[in-house]
Structures are given as structure tokens and as C-alpha cells.
Image: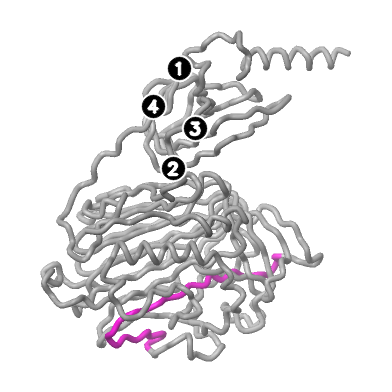
């Protein structure tokens, strides 16, 4: 009886503390004002507390940049995430990537509706979430070879933001980062959704002029993952050693890190990235049969771009969290003793002769034998001049809970026929959007005789980066890609003949996204791009 009485009193106290529907509730005064970047918006949010549940119009996540007003109980610091409980009748006017100012009531009490969030609703007098205009980025001269794209400031030194479906901006978007410096351009694209779980699809590309005066566009991103049993202990997967294909599907959370311009000594670095949180995925066999459903803690893609002399560097940071849960459909399935392989592909379009050299020997994945070649050194040469280089063999870090261990990574050039064709079943319409963006952002690409084909089965160079020790643990790795540039004085004139473009692109291929996203293909185009 005493226990029931205490519970009843607690419920009454909670309901009297916060009720979204009570007509007699008095207004409360805001006590917190912050500014930051929106990293996620969850519409029609349902939350839970000790004795019940509640609904919000939206739950907004904001990465804190500045605290203008705060109560003593507010302890969030710069770069930490702050949740905003938004409950006006109309949806918020912000989206991922926007800079916002939030003014509302901080709820420090645990186990009540909206606990540890800033409340913004009709019962908090004067509360709001408002957009803060982005400051313009430093400008640089317009490049003749770059297309003016709607919503992307291609003339500035750097910019970032979101591109949307014009008829429904919340369904699917592309987050972009753009850098334009010293005659080179870098574009990064990542899909996300504010309505559905975000698909894990990213792309990074660089346009530059090689030493022989040839214009180059080169890109790189994750294509496919494999769990393999290294039976012959050569550190790379051979035919018959792949146990499962590791398919990442979609994520609950999507967080962006906008471009930061950092001066280290006399060299300017540009840093940016995205992070997908709470990812659902699958382990399948070579026939596509699902063997397990898994949850991955996170996947993060971070980049550092800089130029030294006539050489540019894109250093990537791939961070994949541990597998936190697994629903087995095969009773004896285990990750013990399994290694991890990441499959990448390149595609080259150019009327000039070019050669991919693996360990200083010519290589073509479409004609190679199934046996992999461990790659110590790989480069792309045009007219006997190095245009691009892959730096393989760096160490990676594996985390067993809080303990970190260092291991050597391995890379292998692979034949396209070693990747089963059913692994290519993907959201082709999303990949096609990336092709459209590239064509319209860099119009010279669309003038080439050959079509841009982002299917890795058509690639002349497929390679794997391998982590022999894995077993489902978190790993971090930072491979580097090097481009060899011409001097600024060597850039082609706007009146020169049509530019010759080499495209080396590696693109993602993901499987089995939510049916709701697949339905969008019939009715929606990602964006409408403008022209000069």
C-alpha cells in the first residue's frame, strides 16, 4: 500500500511538473540560449520517462558552438551535443547543417519528459529556434572549368551545406563540403534523411591538373565490406576464404563536422567529416542469403586535405565501431577468428593512354586472374608520369573495449570476378544522382565520349584494404591518397582546346535500404542544378 501511494505521489509530481496538454498550466520563462549546428532532426519524436511516454513535434540535436545564457545546472561544453525538445504545432524551420540559435527552458531533472533537453514550446514564453545566417567564405577567382551549381558556392575558398529534393526537403538530402584552392577543387557528398534512417553512402572527389597538363578528377569511397577467414595466413582474402558479406544498411543518427580551415605552420589544412550512428546491417553469404542481423555502433568518415608544393594529400580517417548486437539466423555463426576487408574500385575515362601499376607492374582488374596481388605500391601513370598514388600498408588501431592495439594493414589488387555480381544489388538511383552531380558540377566531364559509370564491376582497378585482426571490434585507419599537380602557372587557359579529363572514382554500393526510400525513386529527383 505504501509503495502504491509513493508511486501515485510521484506520478502526480511528474504530471504537475510538465504537461503538454493542460490548459491551466502557467507559462515558464526561458533560462538557456545557445548557438550551434544542427546535426539531426527527428520528427514526430516519441520519448520515454520513468512512468510513461510523451510526443514532440521534433527532437533537434545541436552541436554547441556558443552559450549565450545558461542556468547553473547547464554543463554542456563547446562541441558537445545539446538536445532540443521542440513542440510547437508547426515543424521547425531548420535542417541538418543549419546554424541555429535556441532560446528555451533547460530541464535538468532526470526521468521526466524532456529531461536533459532545452524545451521550446508554447508553454515556455518567448522560446524559439531561429536560423543564424552563415558568414560568407573567403572568395577566390572563378575557374572556367567549374560549373556554377545551385546551392553550392563554387567560387568561394570553401563552403558546405545541404542539397534537397525540391518538392520535399526533408525526405532525402545530400550534405556537401566544397574546397577551391590553388587551382584544385575537392567535393564531398553524403546522403542523409530527416524522415527515414539515413543510407550509408558517401563520395569524395578531387579535380586538379596533372603535371602533363591533363585535367584530372579522382574520387574515393567505400564500396563493399567482407568478413573472411584467413586460412592460408597471407593476410588478404583468397577465393573461398570470404565467410560473409558485411552490408551496412542505414543509420538512426547522422552528424556532420563542417569544414574547418586550420593553419599548421605555413600549410593550410581543411578538415571535415560525417558520422553515422547506430547502424543496422546484415551478414550474408555469397548467394545473398541473410545469416545475421547486426547493429554497428557507428561509422565515421573524416578528411584532412592540404597542398605542399606541387603535391596534394587527402588523408582519410575511417572509424568503424564495434558490433554491439547480432541476431543470428545461422546457429553456429561466430565472429571469432574473422578478418575484415574493405573493397574499393576505380574508374578511369581519358583519351590518353594511362596505366595502373601495382608493385611497378601493369594491372587491370577486368582481365586479371582471381588470385590477389598484395600491393605494396600502386600508382596511376599517364605518359610515363605519375598522376596519382595510393599509400598502402599503414598501421590500423583495433579497440577491445578501452584497450587499443596496433596492427599492420594489408592491401591487394583484385580481379572484378572475385566480387560476386549479386553484391552489386544496390540503390542504383542514388548512385546515379552522384553521377548527375558530378556531370553538372564539372561540365567538362559530360563532354567525354565515354559515360561515367560508377559500377565497380566495370572498373579496371579493384583493390581491397584488409585488417587481418578484427573479430567485430572497433577499428580506425587513415590511408592517404596523393595527387601530383602542375604549377599554378601551368594551368590551362580558358581559350585552350577542350580539356582532357581522367576520372578515377570509387563509389559505394549498398544493399537493401528501407522500402520507403526505394519508393522515392519513382517520383523524386534529388535536385535541379543550374548552369553558367
CA–CA distance between discs 2 and 3?
14 Å
Determine whether 441 is above or below 108 in the image: below
Q: Which mark is residue 91?
A: 3
Per the model, the C-alpha gap separating discs 4 and 1 is 11 Å
Which residue is identified by label 4? Answer: 67
Q: Which residues are magenta?
A: 335-360
Placement of 149 over or under 98, stated as above or below: below
Describe residue 337's horizontal placement relative to residue 372 as left or right: right
Q: Is residue 215 magenta?
A: no
Instruction: Give the Cα separation between the discs numbered 4 and 3.
Output: 24 Å
Tell me whether circle 2 and circle 1 mark residues in contact (CB < 8 Å). no
Q: Earlier in the sequence, mark 3 or mark 1?
A: 1
Q: Residue furthest front?
A: 523
Tag in front: 2 or 3: 3
Between marks 2 and 4, how big is the CA–CA gap? 20 Å
**At numbered mark 4, what does the secondary structure look like: helix, strand or loop?**
strand
Q: Nearer the viewer, mark 2 or mark 4?
A: 2
Pick the front one: 483 or 449 = 449
Q: Is residue 468 visible?
A: yes
Front-lying residue, 83 or 238: 83
The residue lying furthest to the right in this view is 1
Location of mark 1 (residue): 31
Going from N to C along the chain, the mark reached first, 2 or 4, is 4
Circle 2 residue: 96
- Name the secondary structure under disc 2: loop
State the SS at label 3: loop
Amino acid at each position: 500500500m505504501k509503495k502504491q501511494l509513493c508511486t501515485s505521489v510521484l506520478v502526480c509530481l511528474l504530471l504537475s511538473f510538465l504537461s503538454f496538454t493542460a490548459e491551466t498550466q502557467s507559462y515558464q520563462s526561458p533560462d538557456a540560449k545557445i548557438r550551434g549546428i544542427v546535426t539531426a532532426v527527428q520528427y514526430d519524436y516519441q520519448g520515454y520517462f520513468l512512468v510513461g511516454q510523451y510526443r514532440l513535434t521534433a527532437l533537434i540535436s545541436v552541436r554547441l558552438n556558443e552559450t549565450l545564457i545558461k542556468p547553473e545546472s547547464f554543463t554542456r561544453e563547446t562541441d558537445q551535443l545539446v538536445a532540443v525538445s521542440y513542440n510547437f504545432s508547426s515543424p521547425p524551420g531548420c535542417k541538418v547543417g543549419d546554424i541555429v540559435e535556441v532560446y528555451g527552458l533547460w530541464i535538468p531533472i532526470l526521468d521526466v519528459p524532456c529531461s536533459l533537453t532545452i524545451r521550446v514550446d508554447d508553454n515556455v514564453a518567448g522560446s524559439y529556434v531561429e536560423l543564424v545566417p552563415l558568414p560568407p567564405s573567403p572568395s577566390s577567382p572563378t575557374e572556367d572549368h567549374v560549373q556554377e551549381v545551385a546551392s553550392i558556392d563554387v567560387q568561394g575558398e570553401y563552403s558546405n551545406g545541404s542539397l534537397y529534393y525540391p518538392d520535399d526537403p526533408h525526405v532525402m538530402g545530400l550534405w556537401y563540403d566544397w574546397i577551391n584552392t590553388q587551382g584544385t577543387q575537392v567535393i564531398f557528398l553524403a546522403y542523409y534523411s530527416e524522415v527515414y534512417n539515413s543510407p550509408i553512402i558517401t563520395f569524395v572527389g578531387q579535380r586538379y591538373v596533372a603535371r602533363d597538363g591533363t585535367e584530372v578528377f579522382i574520387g574515393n569511397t567505400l564500396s563493399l565490406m567482407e568478413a573472411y577467414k584467413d586460412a592460408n595466413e597471407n593476410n588478404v582474402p583468397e577465393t573461398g576464404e570470404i565467410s560473409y558479406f558485411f552490408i551496412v544498411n542505414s543509420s538512426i543518427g547522422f552528424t556532420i563536422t563542417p569544414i574547418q580551415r586550420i593553419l599548421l605552420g605555413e600549410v593550410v589544412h581543411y578538415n571535415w567529416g560525417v558520422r553515422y550512428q547506430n547502424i543496422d546491417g546484415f551478414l550474408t553469404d555469397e548467394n545473398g542469403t541473410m545469416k545475421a542481423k547486426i547493429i554497428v555502433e557507428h561509422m565515421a568518415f573524416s578528411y584532412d586535405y592540404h597542398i605542399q608544393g606541387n603535391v596534394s594529400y587527402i588523408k582519410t580517417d575511417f572509424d568503424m565501431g564495434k558490433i554491439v548486437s547480432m541476431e543470428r539466423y545461422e546457429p553456429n555463426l561466430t565472429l571469432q577468428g574473422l578478418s575484415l576487408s574493405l573493397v574499393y574500385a576505380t574508374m578511369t575515362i581519358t583519351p590518353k593512354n594511362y596505366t595502373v601499376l601495382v608493385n611497378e607492374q601493369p594491372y587491370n582488374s577486368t582481365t586479371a586472374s582471381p588470385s590477389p596481388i598484395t600491393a605494396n605500391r600502386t600508382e596511376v601513370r599517364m605518359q610515363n608520369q605519375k598522376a596519382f598514388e595510393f599509400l598502402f600498408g599503414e598501421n590500423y588501431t583495433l579497440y577491445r573495449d578501452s584497450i587499443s592495439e596496433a596492427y599492420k594493414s594489408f592491401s591487394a589488387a583484385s580481379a572484378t570476378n572475385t566480387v560476386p555480381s549479386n553484391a552489386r544489388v544496390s540503390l542504383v538511383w542514388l548512385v546515379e544522382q552522384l553521377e548527375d552531380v558530378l556531370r553538372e558540377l564539372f561540365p567538362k566531364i559530360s563532354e567525354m565520349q565515354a559515360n561515367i559509370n560508377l559500377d565497380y564491376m566495370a572498373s579496371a582497378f579493384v583493390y581491397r584494404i584488409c585488417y587481418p585482426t578484427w573479430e567485430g571490434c572497433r577499428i580506425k585507419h587513415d590511408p592517404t591518397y596523393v595527387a601530383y599537380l602542375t604549377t599554378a602557372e601551368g594551368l590551362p587557359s580558358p581559350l585552350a582546346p577542350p580539356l582532357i579529363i581522367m576520372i578515377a572514382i570509387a563509389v559505394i554500393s549498398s544493399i537493401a535500404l528501407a522500402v520507403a526510400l526505394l519508393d522515392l525513386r519513382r517520383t523524386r529527383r534529388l535536385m535541379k542544378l543550374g548552369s553558367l
